[in-house]
Amino acid sequence: MISEKINEILNEQINKEFYSGYLYLSMSAHLKELGLNGFASWLKHQAREEVEHGLKIFDYLIDCNSFVTLKQIRMPEFEFNGILSIFNMVYDHEKCITQSIMSVAKNAEEECDRTTLNFVDWFIEEQIEEEETVKNIIKRLELFGEDKASLYLLDKELGERGS
Ligand code: OFO
């Protein structure tokens, strides 16, 4: 049985995952307006993954006969300052999510909750992958983001992920 404390932080985590989806959708809409369809589509795809993460925790709580409390999702930012700044924001946001997942693991460890510890392992792996992917996009944007032809190619490449 999941403790009250773990229940509370997992419910918080659902909210954070859904908020991530909201934030990435907001960025996606902005980039679509700028005509950067590939970047927009990449972020929309990412938004879907975040909602999936939230649902994964939702299902876990249900499977453990624990309570689900869906909290209000705050409004994401909607004014941005260019493509590089957007991906830097994504990276910073993912680092916060990693901290948050690590804190779930730390609390589960303190409570000897092995089931939750096993459950969050997947999220830890996922965070490593996500941070690396975003960092890679940032590096390439820093290298040739000013060059329109290169930006076009990167936009095309990211668009291949689908939305
Ligand atoms: Fe961006 O990752 Fe969810 O957890």
Image (cartoon, rainbow, N blue to C red):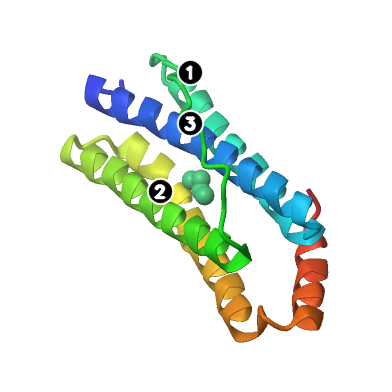
Q: CA distance from mark 3 to mark 1?
A: 9 Å
Q: Earlier in the sequence, mark 3 or mark 1?
A: 3
- Decide if residue 144 is on the left or right side of residue 35: left
Examine the image and state in which quarter residue 161 appears: bottom right
Q: Earlier in the sequence, mark 2 or mark 1?
A: 1
Disc 2 to disc 1: CB gap under 8 Å: no
Residue 62: assigned label? 1
Element type at marker 1? helix
Q: Residue at x 61, y 71 (%)?
A: 137
Q: Nearer the viewer, mark 3 or mark 1?
A: 3
Asked whether the viewer can see residue 41, the reply is: no
Element type at marker 3? helix
Q: CA distance from mark 2 to mark 1?
A: 22 Å
Disc 3 to disc 2: CB gap under 8 Å: no
Q: What crowding class fits label 1: few (fewer than 14 Cα within 10 Å), some (14-19), or many (20 or more)?
A: few
Q: Residue at x 77, y 50 (%)?
A: 33
Residue 69: percent from the left, percent from the top? Answer: 41, 15
Respond yes or no on whether mark 2 lies under 8 Å from ligand 1: yes
In the picture shown, does residue 25 fall above or below 142? Answer: above
Tag 3: residue type?
Ile
Tag 1: residue type?
Ile
Q: What crowding class fits label 2: few (fewer than 14 Cα within 10 Å), some (14-19), or many (20 or more)?
A: some
Q: Residue at x 53, y 64 (%)?
A: 85
Residue where numbered disc 2 is placed: 97
Residue where numbered disc 3 is placed: 57
Q: Nearer the viewer, mark 2 or mark 1?
A: 2
Q: What crowding class fits label 3: few (fewer than 14 Cα within 10 Å), some (14-19), or many (20 or more)?
A: some
Q: Nearer the viewer, mark 3 or mark 2?
A: 2
Q: CA distance from mark 3 to mark 2?
A: 14 Å
